[in-house]
Image (spheres, grey):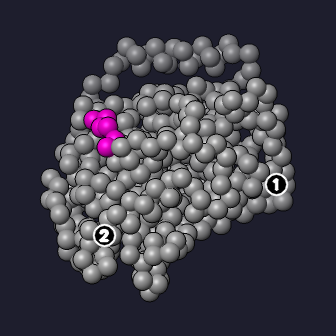
Amino acid sequence: MFRKFKIIGLFIFIFLTLSIFLYLGFDVASKATTNQNNNIPQKQIKMFSEVLNIVHSKYVDKVPNSKLIIDAIKGMVSSLDPHSEFLTPKEFKNMQVSMKGKFGGIGIVIDKKDDFLTILSVLPHTPAKKAGLKPNDVILKINNVSTYRMSLEKSVQLVRGKPNTFIKLTIARKGIAKPLVFNLKRAIIHIKNIDTKLFGNIGYIRIVQFRDHTSHELQKALTQLEKKHIEGLILDLRDNPGGLLSEASKVSNIFINKGIIVSIKGRNKDNDQIIYAKNKPVFKKPVVVLINSGTASAAEIVTGCLKDHDRAVVIGQRSFGKGNVQDVIPLKGGYTLILTVAKYYTPNGFSIQAEGIVPNIEIKKKNQDDFVLRESELLHHLTSKKAMLQKPQEVLIDKNTKEHKQLKNEFIIKQAIKVLEQEIKKCPNSAKVCYVYPKQAN
């Protein structure tokens, strides 16, 4: 018998700091279960044993059988999909450390594409951000060591280190012929999870990730903004890689108080679950949600929920498309199996797995290329029969080619404010009671 901890929308990245950055976290109560397979193919087991003996006796270097077997298990599990994984006790311990929201490193989120490490997002106020690293940069080398076919675990070992020590990254960037070299000083990364701003009568809140207490922090930030008499809100979920299902559900419940938030369906009925919004006071003013290709997992749950309920206008680029569910299963000896067991669906029954959420208003960059990393580009990614790639209601072109130093000058922010001003005009009493739950999503 072993204990099984259910997690939803697990999004495994490397947070190139102390350890693996693993998202949509530990959720739901544990329960005992036994899973015995009486149909193990004996012929293949004998073949495995034969190959193991040959490698052990004839390989050029002596390798312990225990290592060969562990690596074989790792290969079996990782071949299933990009998010299933077998962790050693040390790897699992590092993962738990990374979930505390305090990291030592440079502050980037990565995954593998075409056997190379690719940056998915860069955290604000970190060495990586200050140095100029960007999403979709490909890491060719870490301290002159090639990353080709390097495991995520190995990259952690190379990148992490004591604060104030240096690390060199060799980067390939779209549109630049020669590799770029960055020398970065490691630091303890303290993640400011909620960032707020005020643009006149419009409030702005960015959620970096969905970790413990995110919903409480969001509610507190909203209370402070409402004291300044905001009439609309921009909720920025760009480059948010995910987090805890419980927090994604609570955040959604801040904006809706009826209907389905998310549903979860798997091969085994034990994994099925429907999460409903609780009837409670909610934020009633107009909302715009900002997303991009780095918006994933828990962030997609919130976006899909608010979009399906017509509670927010979604602006930006199609999201990452990470819509599957993992169990974290503790094993004997401190080992851990992370296994995909289900997929989650938006309130209207759509799966975003490998498709992502399409915004109501799509923002395209002038001369924009398609060099972005999404779930559909990951090796062994899963698909879904209920996935539906919808079309945006409107497409706008951002002709700016330079990055703005001030957030308020970004094209997408200007468009969000414009949309909110239009929505505010539709609401009685200066948007004090705009939200009246216009639609029941099923």
The circle drawn on residue 351 is none
Q: Residue at x 37, y 13 (%)?
A: 43
Q: Where does residue 53 sit, x and y in percent of width and height?
A: 57, 17
The circle drawn on residue 185 is 1
Q: Is residue 371 inside the magenta stretch?
A: no
Q: Nearer the viewer, residue 18 or 235?
A: 235
The circle drawn on residue 425 is 2
Q: Nearer the viewer, residue 415 or 160?
A: 415
In the displayed structure image, the side of residue 422 where residue 403 appears, left or right: right
Q: Where does residue 20 sit, x and y in percent of width and height?
A: 59, 49
Q: Residues within 10 Å of mark 1 (few under 14, many from 20)?
A: some
Q: Residue at x 63, y 20 (%)?
A: 56
Secondary structure found at label 2: helix
Q: Residue at x 32, y 60 (%)?
A: 312
Closest to the camera, between mark 2 and mark 1, is 2
Above-or-below relation of 365 to 385: below
**In the rendered structure, which disc, 2 or 1, sits on the residue that comes first in sequence?**
1
Residue 271 visible to the viewer: no
Q: Residue at x 51, y 64 (%)?
A: 206
Q: CA distance from mark 2 to mark 1?
A: 49 Å
Q: Residues within 10 Å of mark 2 (few under 14, many from 20)?
A: few
Above-or-below relation of 169 to 370: below
Q: Amino acid at mark 1?
A: Lys
Magenta segment, prevailing SS (helix, strand or loop)? loop
Quadrant housing residue 266: top left
Q: Amino acid at mark 2?
A: Lys
Q: Where does residue 133 sit, x and y in percent of width and height?
A: 71, 46
**Stretch of the chain drawn in magenta:** 388-393
Are circles 2 and 1 on residues that touch, CB within 8 Å? no
In the displayed structure image, the side of residue 131 where residue 96 appears, left or right: left
